[in-house]
Image (cartoon, grey):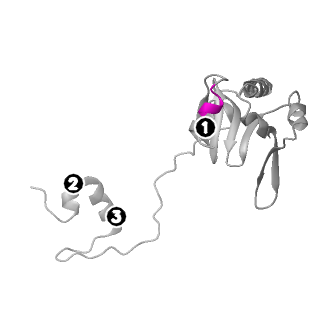
Amino acid sequence: MDRDFLIDLFAQFGPVTIKRMFSGFGVSVDGVNFAIALRSGLYFRADEQTIARFEAEGSTPFQYQTRARTVTVNSYWELPARLFDEPDELPEWARAALQAAQRAAVRKRPKAPKSSKATTRKAIPKKAAPKKAGPKKAGPKKALPKRAGKAAVTRKSAAKTSATTPRTARRGKASR
């Protein structure tokens, strides 16, 4: 089924929104989806009030295959084939499907607005800040590379030099 066919089919029903969905189209009114059009057919939304009508026409619920099993979606039922040729009766079925979709939307629990993570998490007690330790203990001594033309530098003198000397001097370049 293509978009133009669906526009013609629902012309007597009234204005509908047709959007791409799965491998076909979703048909909705005011943001409420009441029909899906796939390669396998046109399916209308159904509920406990309208399923008997679909069953009386010999329709079946929407089904699809996964690798492991067949999934049946009882909320969408195939539109009886005779209705494609009876444009006067189709709007009545479409209105019933829209009403079923609206009833389902009312039954759905409204979604709570997303709140910040801080309010949804349990309060986690903060760890006490570690006490400031005294001077750092010297770790394992590493050999410092010798520079050509300079005397060997000890670990302590290297630390003092890096803290008090400009970067250019530390690189072996004299600051002028």
User: Which quarter of the image is occupied by the N terminus?
Assistant: top right
Magenta range = 7-11
Viewer-proximal residue among 109 and 81: 81
In this orientation, which residue lies closer to the viewer: 159 or 33? 33
- Corner quadrant of residue 170: bottom left
Residue matched to label 2: 166
Q: Earlier in the sequence, mark 2 or mark 3?
A: 3
The residue indicated by pointer 3 is 156
Return the x and y of residue 43 as percentages of the image width and height. Answer: 74, 39
Q: Secondary structure at mark 3?
A: helix
Binning the other alpha carbons within 10 Å of mark 3 as few (below 14), some (14 to 19) or many (20 upward) gives few
Asked which quadrant contains residue 33, the reply is top right
Residue 167's disc number? none
Q: Amino acid at mark 2?
A: Pro
Q: Name the residue located 30 percent from the left edge and 64 percent from the top edge.
A: 158
Q: Tag 3: residue type?
A: Lys
Q: Earlier in the sequence, mark 3 or mark 1?
A: 1
Q: Secondary structure at mark 2?
A: loop
